[in-house]
Amino acid sequence: MILDKFKLTDQVAIVTGVATGLGKAMAIGLAEAGADIVGVYNSHAPEDVQQKIEATGRKFLGIQANLITIEPIKGIVAKTVETFGKINILVNNAGIIRRAPSLEFTEKDWDDVMNVNLKSVFFLSQAVANQFVKQGTGGKIISIASLLAFQGGILIPPYTSSKSGIRGLTQLLANEWARHNINVNAIAPGYMITDNTAPLRSDPVRNKAILERIPAGHWGDPEELQGAVVFLASAASNYMNGFTLAVDGGWLGR
Ligand SMILES: NC(=O)c1ccc[n+]([C@@H]2O[C@H](COP(=O)([O-])OP(=O)(O)OC[C@H]3O[C@@H](n4cnc5c(N)ncnc54)[C@H](O)[C@@H]3O)[C@@H](O)[C@H]2O)c1
Ligand SMILES: O=C(O)C(=O)C[C@H](O)[C@H](O)CO
């Protein structure tokens, strides 16, 4: 039955950046579809996310980790396997943005963005894929890209580079790992209402320009990503590999 293929019953999903915004909504969506969640957070413990996930009847394990370096990655995988015995799904969602003109952009801001948004995505994917191979089960890796994987944008040089990098890396990893039954795909959210985009909404000029450009006529709600992430995490997408799926109110089609 096709609807059964969307179910994630007893799957184990790691979601980074689980405390806020898109990560929080996607973790709750994955739990509602049947998965236990390992939520990686940076600063404050995501007690509200844990409560919502446990209310679905699924388990939640929080792991504090700063992904600006790759040092915590081995521990994330080890703790997940120690607790749940396996991993089935990885959602690389944690990300940062720094805005400044390219003529003035600093090396520190460049490195911080690339480290969190791209370097950690690669090395966490590598560690989880090695676990998938060890298990002999295959698995699903979903990375959160952006419209900036397809367009330039302004004032965000490493962000655009990192998100284009995710799109390319997704293709490469899908090529290399398909033979292990690993699906590697990405999601390109449009302009969604989260902390990340708050400065754009509070700038009347940019807010107006963005709204006028979205065919759907409104900013995205984080919950509007749940369908795409559950689909890419599930058996319903088994023949999809290396693709970046836009969930953007029609932005890229315009
Ligand atoms: N909001 C949008 O419109 C939009 C659109 C496209 C893509 N994205 C991407 O979605 C992802 C989630 O962003 P969001 O919009 O929910 O914003 P957000 O700021 O609420 O979420 C980012 C999350 O990443 C975590 N994080 C940041 N630095 C970290 C670090 N060093 N180590 C571990 N975790 C860290 C934060 O704690 C936070 O929970 C990001 O990758 C972002 O680039 C957002
Ligand atoms: O263009 C900007 O300044 C953004 O903030 C981009 C958004 O965060 C998002 O990635 C658009 O998909």
Image (spheres, grey):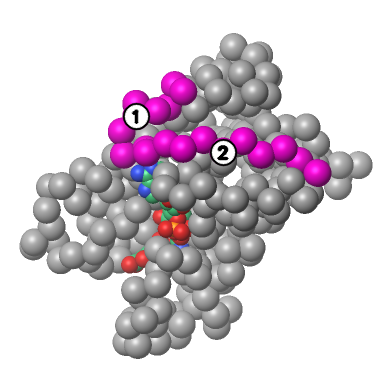
The image position of residue 74, as x and y in percent, is 44, 21
Residue 88 occupies which quadrant of the picture?
A: top right
The image position of residue 117, as x and y in percent, is 36, 45
Q: Residues within 10 Å of mark 2 (few under 14, many from 20)?
A: many
The image position of residue 105, as x and y in percent, is 13, 57
Count how many numbered circles sit on residues in the image.
2
The image position of residue 1, as x and y in percent, is 91, 42
* Horizontal relation, residue 145 to residue 229: left or right: left
Amino acid beneath label 2: Gly
* Horizontal relation, residue 88 to residue 123: left or right: right
Label 1, secondary structure: give it: loop
Residue at x 42%, y 27% (from the top left corner): 73
Residue at x 45%, y 85% (from the top left corner): 212
Residues rendered magenta in the picture = 57-75
Whether residue 236 appears in this view of the structure is no
- Of circles 1 and 2, which is in front? 2
**Which residue does the numbered mark 2 point to in the structure image?**
62
Residue at x 37%, y 38% (from the top left corner): 67
Q: Residue furthest left?
A: 103
**Which residue does the numbered mark 1 point to in the structure image?**
70
- Asked whether 212 or 70 is in front, the reply is 70
Residue 21 tag number? none
Sooner in the amino-acid sequence: mark 1 or mark 2: 2
Gap in angstroms between the C-alphas marked 1 and 2: 18 Å
- Asked whether 197 or 242 is in front, the reply is 197
Amino acid beneath label 1: Ile
* Disc 1 C-beta below 8 A from ligand 1: no
